[in-house]
Amino acid sequence: MEEAIIETRELRHSFSAGESEPTIEVLHGVDLKINRGSFVAIIGHNGSGKSTLAKHFNAIYLPDVGKVWVSGIDTSDESRTLEIRKTVGMVFQNPDNQIVANVVEEDVAFAPENLGVKSEEIRRRVDDALNVVEMYHMRTHSPHLLSGGQKQRIAIAGVIAMQPDCIVLDEPTAMLDPYGRKEIIKTVYTLNRQFGITVVLITHHMNEVTGADRVIVMDKGSVFLDGTPSEIFSHVEELRGVNLDVPAPVALMYELRRAGVDVPLDALEPERCAEVLAALMKNVKTDGTRPEGEHIESDH
């Protein structure tokens, strides 16, 4: 049986715009289990509750009703908040909000120093973390002179240096250009695939989650869909109904199916989509039709 590193049960959370304003519930009884070592993506439109949910995973927010456990620890036990935050590290949208030093390696060392880690161990952790995010060569530079993607990798290195079991990234690519987004997503998948760190990625970029183990779709403060990327993105109309799109390859396959072409919807990546299209063209006869009964198979 797989071990849950994060679990929520009947999680409810509310906000009020002001003292005289009514309280609005933004999470409505969320039940989730996130297994240790997995890569879980949480997607949803603005206001769906995904970021509020993420902030419960390391006790930034506490439940109004229900429970959240991190490695079996109740997050409402304030005597263990530090232990929870050492287990689950957070990376946010704006890396400038997490950069506190004028030199890259000093910034990465900041959290371990505050945890009382010995100097020799800090040196090792900083070097290892910078190597993981491929920023060791920039260790003596000022982080404020780096690109947005480089700053975000430094912010991730700072969390890695704390040696958490899980990293939650709350829309880490929202402020980046396409190249910067690609850098960060590559780094995030490396953390999970090569180093076994549990990853929870909050995003609204559908193409960032196609390689995840599991995708959770949030809508109006509740879990709307939960499954593998192939399962989730087969629900094209349902996703569009909650203001979400699907990866471009899936959208293309969907339109071909609507036009009567029998192609699979699990071609999530451009390369796989190209394979399907190549096979389709190969099977088309000179008059523009395909042999009766033939269809394009998926090998996934």
Image (cartoon, rainbow, N blue to C red):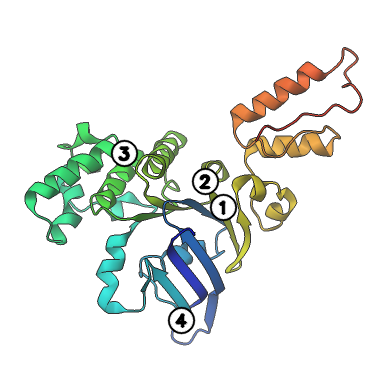
How far from the left and from the top, in percent, is residue 182?
44, 36
Question: Relative to residue 68, is residue 228 depicted above or below?
Answer: above
Q: Amino acid at mark 1?
A: Val
Badge 4 element? loop
Rendered residue at 71%/35% (across/down): 252
Q: Nearer the viewer, mark 3 or mark 4?
A: 4
| Quadrant in which residue 227 is drawn | bottom right
Mark yes or no: residue 245 visible: no
Q: Amino acid at mark 2?
A: Ala
Sequence-wise, which precedes: disc 3 or disc 4? 4
Q: Nearer the viewer, mark 4 or mark 2?
A: 2
Left or right: residue 274 versus residue 63 is right
Disc sitting over residue 64 in the figure: 4
Question: Relative to residue 253, is residue 116 depicted above or below?
Answer: below
| Mark-to-mark CA distance, 4 and 2 | 30 Å
* Marks 3 and 4 close (CB-CB < 8 Å): no
* Marks 2 and 1 close (CB-CB < 8 Å): yes
Disc sitting over residue 150 in the figure: 3
Q: Nearer the viewer, mark 4 or mark 1?
A: 1
Rendered residue at 89%/21% (across/down): 291
Q: Amino acid at mark 4?
A: Asp
Disc sitting over residue 215 in the figure: 1
How far from the left and from the top, in percent, is residue 54?
44, 63
Badge 3 element? helix
Q: Nearer the viewer, mark 3 or mark 1?
A: 1
Q: Amino acid at mark 3?
A: Gln
Residue found at the far left of this picture: 119
- Residue placed under numbered mark 2 in the picture: 212
| Mark-to-mark CA distance, 3 and 4 | 37 Å
How far from the left and from the top, in percent, is residue 195?
34, 43
Rendered residue at 70%/27% (across/down): 276
